[in-house]
Amino acid sequence: MDIVKIRRVGNSNVISLPKSLEGLGYVSGTSVVVEELDSGELRVVPVSKVRELIREVGRRVVAENREALQILERHDSQGSSPAGRSRARRRIG
């Protein structure tokens, strides 16, 4: 663990990352996403890894809400025929 200081560069605050993080992909010119967590901590993730983070969140949401998603799936399959959809449109419209 390294301790670094926040510096002012122009109108921005800058944190210098230790050179030891270059092996993880944090090299000059790398685009990163900076996210503030509820705890007040910052999470820094290379843009190239954001897609996997989105997949992880999706898996977690599905796992936590499996019953609700199954209910929605059953509801959707009941009105999935073209005739069922057109009847639904007539009732709504």
Image (cartoon, grey):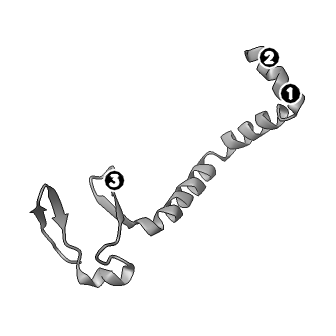
Q: Which residue is mark 1?
A: 84
**Residue 90 place in picture, x, y as percent:** 80, 16
Quadrant assignment, res 70: top right
* Towards the viewer: 65 or 43: 43
Lower position in the chain sequence, tag 1 or tag 2:
1
**Residue 89 placed where, x, y %?**
77, 21
Residue 81 lies, with reference to residue 40, above or below; the image says: above
Alpha-carbon span between mark 1 and mark 3? 45 Å
Position of the N terminus by quadrant: bottom left
Q: Residue at x 47, y 62 (%)?
A: 50
Looking at the image, is mark 1 or mark 3 earlier in the sequence? 3
C-alpha separation, residue under disc 1 versus residue under disc 2: 10 Å
- Judging depth in this view, the residue of 66 and 85 nearest the camera is 85
Q: Could you tell me which quadrant the C terminus lies in?
A: top right
Kind of element beneath mark 2:
helix
Q: Amino acid at mark 3?
A: Leu
* Residue 48 left/right relative to 36: right
Instruction: Write the residue at 11% across / 64% down.
Output: 7
Q: Residue 43 is drawn in which quadrant?
A: bottom left
In the displayed structure image, the side of residue 68 where residue 39 appears, left or right:
left
Foreground mark, 1 or 2, reads 2
Mark 3 or mark 2: name the one nearer the start of the chain: 3
Q: Amino acid at mark 2?
A: Arg
Residue located beneath label 2 in the image: 90
* Mark carried by residue 37: 3
